[in-house]
Amino acid sequence: MKETLDEQSRLGLMRYRMERADETMEEVGILAERGHYNAAVNRLYYACFYATQALLLKHHIAATTHAGVKSMLGLHFVSKGIISINHGKTFNTLFEKRHSSDYEAFAYCDKALVDDLTPLAEAFIQRIKELL
């Protein structure tokens, strides 16, 4: 049985998730600088994932899996125009890239991909900050 958070705990967890999102974005640059592009894409996804978790918490929306977080983002925010379709696509792309790099035998991310996805992830997180 899941425990219900009191308001103070919920707000604290939201702040923690956003701190994790910001810290994880810092990791992207370090990894990319060292040529660890698969890991950098993984961190881009997790930064957006943590921010999305904070947004869902704010609205008392439960999601217990990565796919659930993605679905709830689409259902409650993208489909209603609160978050743009482009931001939704960013999250979906990062979700797919992270999943394939974690579970497929031959996943390959390169500098160009990281360079393309980083500003999209930053914009996604900024939009969530505006909503919080």
Image (spheres, grey):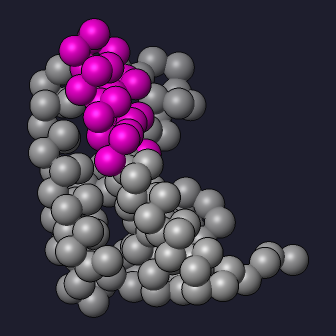
User: Would residue 6 be found to the left or right of residue 129 on screen?
Assistant: right
User: Would residue 60 be found to the left or right of residue 83 on screen?
Assistant: right
Rendered residue at 65%/66% (across/down): 64
Q: Nearer the viewer, residue 126 or 87?
A: 126
In this rendering, the answer to whether 7 lies above or below 74 is below
Does any portion of residue 111 appear in the rendered image? yes
Rendered residue at 12%/37% (across/down): 116
42 falls in the magenta region:
yes
In this rendering, the answer to whether 24 lies above or below 17 is above
Q: Nearer the viewer, residue 106 or 89?
A: 89
* Residue at the extreme right of the image, as rendered: 1
Rendered residue at 47%/58% (across/down): 17
Q: How many marks?
A: 0
Q: Nearer the viewer, residue 117 or 126?
A: 126
Magenta region: 22-46
* Residue 118: % across, % down: 18, 40
In this rendering, the answer to whether 8 lies above or below 87 is below
Q: Tell me which secondary structure the magenta stretch mostly adopts.
A: helix
* Residue 76: % across, % down: 39, 85
50 falls in the magenta region:
no
* Residue 15: % across, % down: 44, 64
Does any portion of residue 70 appear in the rendered image? no
